[in-house]
Image: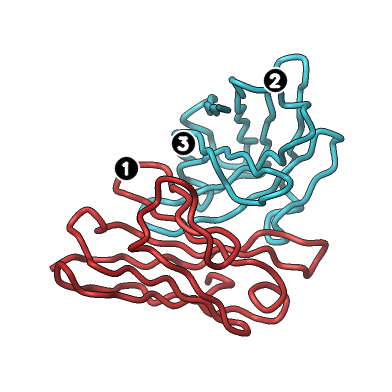
Amino acid sequence: QSVLTQPPSASGTPGQRVTISCSGSSSNIGSNYVYWYQQLPGTAPKLLIYRNNQRPSGVPDRFSGSKSGTSASLAISGLRSEDEADYYCAAWDDSLSGHWVFGGGTKLTVL
Amino acid sequence: QVQLQESGPGLVKPSQTLSLTCTVSGGSISSGSYYWSWIRQPAGKGLEWIGRIYTSGSTNYNPSLKSRVTISVDTSKNQFSLKLSSVTAADTAVYYCASEPVTLNWFDPWGQGTLVTVSS
């Protein structure tokens, strides 16, 4: 049972826009930044979005992040076959001396 | 550019202690610029943060694992290590080490990951 809640799956066709949600609480998303990671099969996760809505260099602007209250979202526009991957949200949680928490992950399928 | 590489036994017996090391290259582990984390992922499941250490030796642990986890740093070898005691099959996972810049707090880069299986 992950502290942050994500839908287990999402799907879309090439060119579509897909959003993935991430729900938390006041001790994590509500008071700290949200980060998103993309994990391709058999590889380590890769940073996709940091500080709610910032893209590291090299990440296409098709990927965008947002946060409102205790929830966050990742949007992928102009969906491409290579976007098929697992996506994880993460946030620092201020409770119990502080610790990182992850969402359970969302498997994105490009139909 | 910092690079990380995990190493350690791929098979651990139940009730024993899992020990892994992460070697940092391309930068000094004692620079003070990073936290050094361990994260794991059971097969087909999500990511679970285990804990982190700062150069000073200060640590933060996942509350659900805290009683069994010790993370330490060896600045002379540019390495940090994970010890997880009293392991069970539920601890079978790919274990990643990752760096977390103090000012940005993202996990990047990650090591390639190492599979640890708990079985007799």
Q: SS class of the residue under badge 1? A: loop
Disc 3 marks a residue whose amino acid type is Gly
Tell which subunit mark 3 falls on. B
Q: The chain coloured red carries which letter? A: A
- Does residue B97 appear left or right of residue A16 in this picture? right
Q: Are marks 3 and 2 in contact (CB under 8 Å)?
A: no
A76 and B19: which is toward the camera: A76
- Between tags 3 and 2, which lies in front? 2
Q: Is residue B37 visible?
A: yes
Which residue bears the numbered disc 3?
Answer: B113
Q: Are marks 2 and 1 in contact (CB under 8 Å)?
A: no
Tell me: residue B115, above or below residue B93: above
Residue B97 is situated, as x and y percent measured from the top left of the image, at 57, 38
Tell which subunit mark 2 falls on. B
- Does residue A109 appear left or right of residue B19 in this picture? left
Sequence order check: which comes first, mark 3 or mark 2?
2
Residue at the spot x=29%, y=48% of the render?
Answer: A41
Residue B106 is situated, as x and y percent measured from the top left of the image, at 60, 51
Q: Quadrant of the C terminus of chain A?
A: bottom left
What crowding class fits label 3: few (fewer than 14 Cα within 10 Å), some (14-19), or many (20 or more)? many
Q: Which numbered dot is residue A42?
A: 1
Tell which subunit mark 1 falls on. A
What crowding class fits label 1: few (fewer than 14 Cα within 10 Å), some (14-19), or many (20 or more)? few
B75 and A96: which is toward the camera: B75
Which residue bears the numbered disc 2?
Answer: B78
Q: Quadrant of residue B2?
A: top right
Q: Quadrant of residue A90?
A: bottom right
Q: Is residue B120 visible?
A: no
Q: SS class of the residue under badge 2? A: loop
Q: Are marks 2 and 1 on the same chain?
A: no
